[in-house]
Image (cartoon, helix red, strand yellow):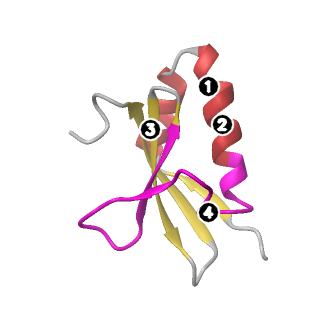
Amino acid sequence: MASYQIEWKRSALKEFRRLPSSVQGKVFQAIEKLGENPYPHGVVKLTGSTRSYRLRGGDYRVVYTVDSALLRIEIVRIRHRRDVYR
């Protein structure tokens, strides 16, 4: 299986930098693993979208899109679970 290229939206990168340092490492590791398998166990497809998925990282959620034709993953949003869907 080919590895996927991970791209970050500018807003998602800003959200990542605002995370507590204790959470950043865990979330970053989970995102790096997406490059090998964009659909790991526990990932949920978001309703109303054809390519958006949610990854859990403790109390934080990573929303990303997958473009299988271009082998690309785009990190769209990283927020606390109470704020991510607003």
Q: Report if the CB atoms under discs 1 and 2 are less than 8 Å apart.
A: yes
Q: Is residue 37 magenta?
A: yes
Q: Which mark is residue 24?
A: 1
Inter-mark Cα distance, 1 to 2: 6 Å
Type of residue at label 2?
Phe
Q: Position of residue 34 (x, y in %)?
A: 66, 55
- The N terminus lies in which quarter of the figure? bottom right
Amino acid on which the number 4 mark rests in the picture: Pro
Query: Few, some or many C-alpha atoms within 10 Å of disc 4 (few <14, some 14-19, many ≥20)?
Result: many
Q: Which residue is mark 2?
A: 28
Q: Nearer the viewer, mark 4 or mark 1?
A: 4
Could you say whether the residue bearing mark 2 is in a helix, strand or loop?
helix
Q: CA distance from mark 2 to mark 3?
A: 12 Å
- Res. 61 mark: 3
In the image, what residue occupies the spot 61% across and 15% down? 21
Please name the residue shown 41% across and 70% down the image. Answer: 51
Q: Nearer the viewer, mark 1 or mark 3?
A: 3
Q: Over which residues does the magenta segment extend?
A: 32-56
| Dot in front, 2 or 4 | 4
Decide: is 69 above or below 28.
Answer: below
